Amino acid sequence: MPTILSAQQVTKSYSSSGTDVVAVLNLSLDIEEGELVCMLGASGCGKSTMLNLFAGFTTPSSGRVLLRDRPIAGIEPRCGMVFQSYALFPWKTVRQNVEFPLRMRGLARSERRAMADFFIDLVQLDGFADHYPAELSGGMQQRVTLARCLAADPEVLLMDEPFAALDAMTRQVMQDELLRIQRQSGKTIVFITHNIDEAIVLGHRIVVMSARPGRIRRIIPNPLPQPRDIAVQTSTAFADLKTEIWREVEGEVAQHIVQSRLAGSAQ
């Protein structure tokens, strides 16, 4: 498959309390069209920074970020972001929230409604179109967020720990739903997580990040069959892959803890 998203020798630094902090250092990564890539690592390892660079919310200090071989020079509408927080309009219904990006595109009312209802059905929220966010569970609100992002028809979905705030069972359901939607839509997805199990369930490849400054420690292809149901998740192969990934991550987590303690003592 062709490369759709690419980071080439990217470094990103910023100033914090008068000190320059390098969030990402000399990072290169190619993401293929239709791929679901999970980026995994300790807090502060540059995962969210890379997502913001892919979205065009910020620019590299050096290096290049490309979408279809063209530099991303500003906020990129072809890359849709789904955050951990739901970021819904509380005064709008589910349908109105999903219609919002369609309204911004100037689509006629009848077309907006038809498209919104299609995506509401895609995330299996039919029957809730006229409900308000406060009337929905956390998992349902995240489905609305996903439907709204899909309605904008981005080429790439950028997902920043979107299920982290959900309980374990709802999280499992949302993982299954995301995989179903990805198979149906063929969307390219870059998914940030701290959770090794989640990365294994979702990812075609798992990008393990180092502690700050963020670099790619290792890219691990995921050989497990799909769908990765409970039989796969309780298999020896799943446990072996989890152990392999943990061996890569363990030292980085320990380094992050040390860095955090040193930063705290310096204040």
Image (cartoon, helix red, strand yellow):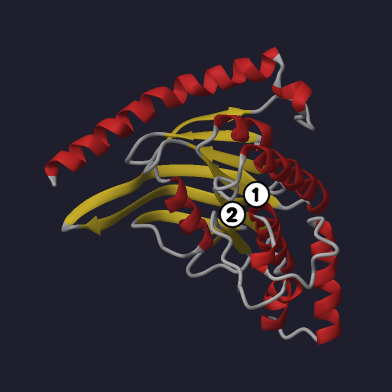
Q: Residues within 10 Å of mark 2 (few under 14, many from 20)?
A: many
Residue farthest along the left direction in this orientation: 266
Q: Amino acid at mark 1?
A: Ile
Classify mark 1: residues with Cα within 10 Å, few (<14), some (14-19) or many (20+). Answer: many
Q: Which dot marks residue 17?
A: none
Q: Is residue 36 above or below residue 153?
A: above
Name the residue rendered at 76%, 73% in the picture. Answer: 95
Can you say which quadrant of the picture contains the N terminus? Answer: top right
Q: Is residue 8 above or below residue 237?
A: below
Where 196 sits versus 174, above or below? above
Q: Residue at x 78, y 56 (%)?
A: 123
- Identity of the residue drawn at 68% across and 38% down: 169
Q: Position of residue 237 (x, y in %)?
A: 68, 16
Q: Is disc 2 in contact with disc 1, using a CB cutoff of under 8 Å?
A: yes
- In terms of depth relative to the viewer, which is nearer, 108 or 86? 86
Q: Which residue is mark 1?
A: 189
Q: Position of residue 5 (x, y in %)?
A: 59, 52
Q: Nearer the viewer, residue 235 or 215?
A: 235
Q: What is the x, y in percent for residue 59?
A: 41, 62
Relative placement, left or right, of 245 versus 43 is right
Q: CA distance from mark 2 to mark 1?
A: 6 Å
Q: Residue at x 22, y 35 (%)?
A: 261
Instruction: Pick the residue in front: 231 or 38.
Output: 231
Which comes sooner in the sequence, label 2 or label 1?
A: 2
Secondary structure beneath label 2: strand
Q: Amino acid at mark 2?
A: Leu
- Where's residue 53, x and y in %? 46, 57
Query: Which mark, residue 158?
Result: 2
